[in-house]
Amino acid sequence: MLFFLRLDAPQSSSSNTSPSIHRIDWPGNILFAGSILSQLLALVGGGALHPWTSPSTLVPLIIGIIGWILFHIYEALPPKYCPHPCIPPHLFSTRNSLLGFILAFDAALLMQWTLYFIPIYFQGVQRKSPLTSGIDLLPYSAFLIPFAMVAGTIMSRTGLCRPLHFTGFAALSLALGLFTLLSANSPRGAWVCVQLPAALGQGFLATTILPAIQSSLGPADTASSTGVYAFLRSLAFVWGSTAPGIVFNARVDVYAGRILDYETLRERLLDGRAYGAAAEFAGDWGAGMDTVQREQVREVYRLALRTVWLVGLAFALVGVVVGLGMRRVVLRGELEENGYGLKEKGDVQRDDKERVVDEAVGEDEGEAKREGEGTESRA
């Protein structure tokens, strides 16, 4: 970026930086950062440091939600009260942009959803070590980027986004549905093939949602729309690990009752301990159990994960329906003036030529001036 990014940033008529500082949306940024921080404190600590019903979890979560609502109300106020909103409301004024932001959140949510719990299947159901679980996740990781490249190429040449979004979420729906069928006896080929639709779905969505959003907005909204897109994905990553974790722990608490006559064993899984106990179950803790105990714990993990996959399937189907509302994308072929200092390659080359000409003219004028001064002195 330092060596190759050429910026022609507009210069201020004054060296005073106070006008630029006044353009910062201070109230909006304070509301935004405070509300998100409050939500993150609740989401990170809920179920781990404190129960979800604890005031230590509920109070910051409620405050964060209220602050988030107040933030959007403030951003929608007339320019007299909010002259420079950090998230302009008009970013959500078109169908493609609004639905695109929803799809971006949903896709990122499902990415974290699957990546966070597929290793738990390998550890808790098939009793594989964390290292082996990471290796067994390679089919997902290896095929995601090639599928993303294919989808990006198709979209850039055809402008089609709705078929790609539909295919992406349909593939995720298929993968999550197939995940529910996995068990301790599933062969290697089964769980390898099941990961491929998930990789296809995430790959098709990774490179096609943001262009669909920006195509319906003006060039001046490129930076702000990219920022909102990145923020929604980051927020979805947090919810993508928290929401399935809540579902998983709740179902483990229910199914742990099926472990008969082993009170100590049940306590190792209750109250949010099951996720961390999966690695221990794959190691020495599971090796020290008898066959009956081991199979009962495996069944608890399998049933709890089945519910996690079913809830994820519901989110994937929401993406299928929302994606059908997207319109055909018309990609811009030329870079328009955007106010961010970016120029096309041809413009940069022309500027360089003009700069060389100006310098040459300046040198000629300087030489002529010096010759004139010399003539006057001789006279």
Image (cartoon, helix red, strand yellow):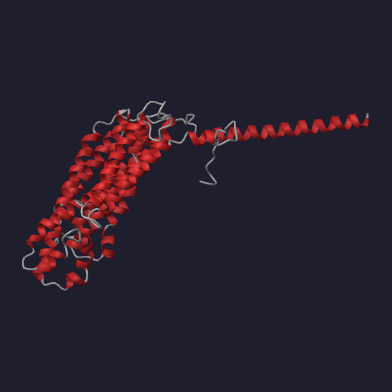
- Asked whether, in this view, residue 337 is left or right of residue 283, the answer is right
Residue at the image point whose x is 36% and y is 32% from the top:
75
Left or right relative to 141: residue 270: left
The answer to which of 189 and 126 lies nearer the viewer is 126
Compared to residue 296, the image places residue 6 above or below, namely above
Does the rendering let one see residue 167? yes
Q: What count of labels does the image hold?
A: 0
Instruction: Please provide percent x and percent y for residue 165.
Output: 27, 38
Residue 362, how many percent across, how many down? 73, 32
Q: Position of residue 59 (x, y in %)?
A: 25, 47
| Along the line of sight, the residue nearer the viewer: 210 or 196 | 210
Question: Between 182 and 251, which is closer to the camera in this rendering?
Answer: 251
Q: Is residue 88 above or below residue 136?
A: above
Q: Indicate the position of residue 212 as horizontal and vertical percent values.
A: 34, 34
Q: In which quadrant of the rendered image does the C terminus lie?
A: top right
In-image side of 271 versus 371 (left or right): left
- Name the residue furthest right: 379
Does residue 159 appear in the picture of this structure? no
Nearer the observer, 362 or 240: 240
> Which residue is drawn at the image coordinates 15% and 59% (left, top)?
301
Q: Residue 275: which quarter of the image?
A: bottom left
